[in-house]
Image (spheres, rainbow, N blue to C red):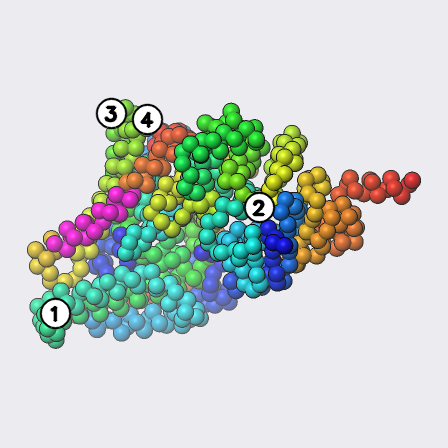
Amino acid sequence: MTYILMAEGLSFGYSGQPNVLEDINIQITETEKVGVIGPNGAGKTTLFLLICGVLKPGVGTLEAFGDRVRHGVFQPETGMVFQHTDDQLICSSVREDISFGLQNMGLDDREINNRVTEVSGITGIKDLLDRPPHYLSSGEQRLVAISGILAMKPRLLILDEPTSDLDIRYRRRMIQLIEGMKEQTLLIASHDLEFIIETCDRVLLLDDGGIQADGEVVETMSDRNLMEGHGLEVPHSLTSTYHRHRGA
Amino acid sequence: MHVPDGIVPAWVAITGYAAAGGTTWFSLDRIKRKYENPREMIPTASLLTAVFFVASLIHIPMPPTSVHLVLSGLMGVVLGWYAFPAILIGLFFQAVMFQHGGLTTLGLNACIMGLPALLAFGIFRLRYLRGGDKPGPSMIFGFLAGFSGLVLGALMSSLILILTIPANLDVSVERAAILSLLVAHIPLALLEGVFTALVVLFMLRVKPGLLEAELK
Amino acid sequence: MIIEDIASVPAGNPLYRWEPRTKLIGIMCLAFAFAAVRDLRLLPVMLALSLFLFVLSSLPFSYLLGRMRIPGIFLLAMAVVLPFFSGNTVLVQLGPVSLKQEGCVSLLLIAVKFLCIVTIAVVLFASTPLTRMLGSMRSLGLPPLLGDMMLFTYRYIFQLAADFHRASTAACLRGARMRSLKSLKTTAYIVGSLMVRSHERAERVFHAMTLRGYGRQDMDFYKAKIRPPDVIAGSACVLAAAGFVLFQLLMP
């Protein structure tokens, strides 16, 4: 069986510093939606940058779509939406920004136009296309950033803290958007555990440079000892369920 | 384009400091006249100075070598009268952090980069004679600002180096040396011109205010 | 390229304890005196003085070497040109090229001056945290507007460098080749975006600062007391500098 993503004994440290990630083993199959949780500085973003080929693994193997991830090579099949949209939105209009990756993929203008229209329909930002991305609300910016990646039709989509700057309404839109992504494989890092519960069917707990837990979302996150042992809390919705069950 | 320590005679270095001091004073005077509270623009000017500092570290390959952007022209276009103090500050930090440039030649280097920035500032203003803030003229004058900023800087540094080096070169050799140094800088000047025009176009679309009167 | 506001010279070092204003004046005078050297007899003195300051700073040699790399390229270019093109007195004839005495002398002069000035500049900056340096420059008469700009610029350089780095990583992940001429437009866009965002951010920074009373008084800056040893060290440098100049004026 080929995995969409497979890491074996993966370690990484920034030069001259102790390893940020140590002996990471992950297998993710097609269309899985996997949440990545863990305290600040656990290495979530580092892991993502490794998967994208931005960083070079120290030891171990890292394969995406059955091939070794090549360092520094453009791979539109893996798309990553950065935690801060400021890092990603650089063009002078939303349309141009969504086209950015498509142009680099070498697509022709008609295809680019089609994809921009299609993706902006999905994310619901058609009326923003001609505005500079710098002056949109943070919710709108988030949608534009995702559109820029979605347009490249990645098979593996990585979202780094997608809800950190969203209000309730945009957070709901984000959840609906992800629910609509039936074909993509998703990797979502978030401190918003309720968001993970709603969007993912599997969760990885990353701390101290290693994967401390890997399992079904509700089951893993209800484990109070596990969660509190790694600087997290059991999400409220799960505790109330827990209490109700105990009362009954 | 940076003149390092120990190469030019002391009097040239001291003259550089004097000229840089005078130009800074003149710029600050212009800034004070323009603003009731000149401090209001300090965060903006400083953050933009930091952007330029970072941008000047970008290396762009130009076979057979790679070059870094000088950005005098763009600084003049965006910072106006703040350009000279900004360049002085940027060079100070470069000297402190990377020993890029020099301690005794800080004033001289500020003039080599800063006076072209003021020239570019002037050139970019000329666009008001030709259609103002329309994309076409803005890009053309942006290109000219970036291009001439670099050419003037290259001319100044070549002149200073060749004329003050303690060498008994004869006049024809000197002239040839200066000319070839200038010619060698033409591709760089084109690069700066195009880069400046691109940033100008970006600003025009995203935040035209930054190109107009805010800092000038 | 992250550099924190700490000095590389350990805090107990005499150079670190040397009060920044007298240190700045002393070392600057020395640097200019070095720049003014034309007499070859002064080179050993200059080297000895620089070496003394460097050894006193207890900086590792590799630190100095690292700092010499960028400006050293320039020196290398000089070394290629000067000995062959400058002067008339031929020392060695190597086929069509001839090594000339005047060129070699000026190269020696330039190289030693360069080496010495860079060394004492490294000692000066490595033994003084930058905020202290800026504070002392202000109390020496740097215009407040310039002083404030320097502090702010310094505050944001590292943040913006990190911002730039992340933005270019994000662009690379969308297929931009940042290390090619084709990326000029992308680079221009990133720089433009940084400028636009910095501009907005600066407005917020300014509001936050005025709310905390900025502009009512000069910003606080570092003031260390000048003690007798500081004056002695500073005067020693100034005297040495004067000695260099006088020697060349008086001695034939």
Tell me how far mark 4 sits from mark 1, CA to CA. Answer: 56 Å
Tell me how far mark 3 sits from mark 1, CA to CA. Answer: 55 Å
Residue C97 numbered mark, or none:
1
Residue B133 numbered mark, or none:
4
Q: Position of residue C84 (x, y in %)?
A: 14, 67
Residue in front for this viewpoint, C138 or A16: A16
Chain letter for the residue marked with disc 4 in the picture: B
Helix, strand or loop at mark 2? strand
Chain letter for the residue marked with disc 1 in the picture: C
Helix, strand or loop at mark 1? strand
Q: Which residue is mark 2?
A: A156
Residue in front for this viewpoint, A230 or A156: A156
Q: Which residue is mark 3?
A: B129
Residue furthest front in the image: A1
Q: Nearer the viewer, mark 3 or mark 1?
A: 1
Range shown magenta: B176-192
